[in-house]
Amino acid sequence: MALNSLILGLQWGDEGKGKIVDALSKEVHAVCRFQGGHNAGHTIKVNGHQTVLHLTPSGILHPNVNCLIGNGVVLSLEALDKEIKGLEEAGISFDKRFFVSSSCALILPSHISIDKVRDKKESIGTTGRGIGPAYEDKIARRAIRFGDIGNEQLLRDKIELLVSYHNRLLVELYNEDPHNIEDMIKELLSYKHLYDKYCTDTQDLLYKWVKADKPLLFEGAQGTLLDIDHGTYPFVTSSNTTAGGVSTGLGLGPKYIDKIIGISKAYATRVGEGPFLTELFDDNAKMLAERGREFGATTGRPRRCGWLDLVALKKAIFTNSVTDLCLTKLDVMDEFKSIEVCVDYKDNAPVFKIFDGWESSSEGVTDFSKLPIKAQEYINFIEDFIECSISIISTGPSRDQTITR
Ligand code: IMP
C-alpha cells in the first residue's frame, strides 16, 4: 500500500523543509500544499543552481510529479503568474500536472495594502503579502475564491462589495489611498488564463489518487510555532501550520496521513517579532547567522538566531504526532567551542544544558557513524530528551548532503 507523508516545520519556519520535500518528491505521485500563501519561501539547491519557491509545491522540479494547491491556501494570482513564468523560462513545465483548488481564497492588492499599513502599527513583522487580511475575509465569508474568476458578473459583484469595504478601512481608519475597483476587476480578469489552465476541484482529484493508491506528499509552509492556534500568538501567521491543517486545507481525512515528518534545525531562528526565549545576541548569534546564511527567502530580512529549544520541540512533536524527525543544518554548528540546548524554563527564562562543540567538519557527511563523536552525542541527547528518533540529518544544502538512518 502506498504511504502518504506530511512534512512540516517544528519551529518558526525556515527549517529547511524545501530540501527534504524535494528529496522525497521524486518518489511520490503528487506534492500538495494545504495552507499559507506566497509568504513561504522554499530555497532549493539543485545541480548547484538555487531556486526559491513561494507558492508552487517543491515537487515541481521533478518533471513527473504532480503539484496541487489545496483550498486552505490563500492565493495571489499575481504571485502565481510570476512564479509560473519564471519557472517556465527555466524549462520547467506545468502542463497537465499543476492543479489549484477552485475554493482558494484570493489575496487582492487591497489585502496587501491593509497588511502593510496595519503592520506599521501592530508590529507583528509580517511578510507584507496580505496573508492575514485574506484569511480574515475567508473566515468572515466574504472572500473572492479562485473559482469566481470564471463568472465575470459574480466576480464584479463580489469585488465591488469587498473592495468598497477595504477602501473604507484604508481611507477612514488608516488614512491611506483607496484602490480603484474597476482596475482591480480588470487585473483579476487578466489572470483568466490561470483559471482556464489550473483551476479545478482538487478534492475530487485527491479522492481519485487515494483510491488508485498513489503515494502523496503534503508540504507544510511556515512552522508549528507560527500556527494561529498553537504558536506564539499573536506573533503568528494566520493559518494552521500544524498537522490538523492538512485535513481542512485539502479536504482529506486524517487517516490518509501515514507518516508525519517534522523538521527542525539543529539550532533555532525566527523572522519577524515575537518571543524567542533562546535567542542569542552575541558572537554566537553572528556565527549562526553567517554560517547558516540566515536571511529570509521571501523578504531578505536577517533572521534572529539562537539555541535549540527542546521543550518547545517536544511539544511540537506532540502537537503534530510526528513519527519521523529530521534535523537540518547540523554543519552550521561545526565551529562552535560550546553548544547549548534549552531543557527547561524557570521564571520565563530558559535553562540550558551545555555541550562541548565538535570543532570539526560534518559538512556533506552521509553516514551517521562518520559524524564527529561530539556531534553524534548532541544528536543522541536530543533524541532521548524528545523521545523521538531522528531519521534524517541534513549536513549541507545539496540533495546528496544527507544522512538517512
Ligand atoms: P504573515 O504570514 O506574512 O502574516 O506573517 C506573520 C509572521 O509569520 C511573521 O512573523 C512572519 O515573519 C512569519 N512568517 C510568515 N511566513 C514565514 C516563512 O515562510 N518563514 C518564516 N517566517 C514566516
Image: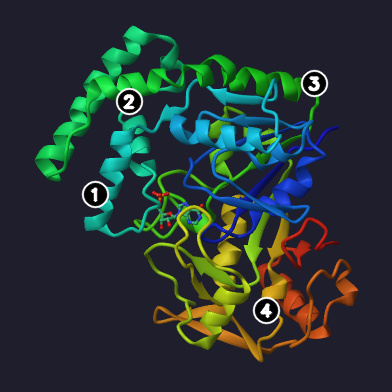
Q: Amino acid at mark 3?
A: Ala
Residue located beneath label 3 in the image:
212
Residue located beneath label 2 in the image:
141
What separation in Å lies between label 1 and label 4 (alpha carbons)?
Answer: 38 Å
Give residue 84's quadrant in the image: top right
Residue located beneath label 4 in the image:
333
- Chain-order first, disc 1 or disc 3: 1
What separation in Å lies between label 2 and label 1 (alpha carbons)?
Answer: 23 Å
Q: Which quadrant does the N terminus fall into?
A: top right
Q: What residue sits 40% from the left and 62% below the top?
A: 272
Which residue appears farthest toward the left when viewing the image? 172
Please tell me whether mark 2 or mark 1 is closer to you in this view.
1
The crowd level at tag 4 (other Cα within 10 Å; few <14, some 14-19, many 20+) is many
Q: Provide the secondary structure element on which disc 4 rests.
A: helix
Q: Is mark 1 within 8 Å of ligand 1?
A: no
- Chain-order first, disc 2 or disc 4: 2
Q: What residue sits 62% from the left and 58% below the top?
A: 317
Residue located beneath label 1 in the image:
117
**Residue 322 shows in this picture:** no
Near-viewer residue (104 or 194): 194
- Chain-order first, disc 1 or disc 4: 1
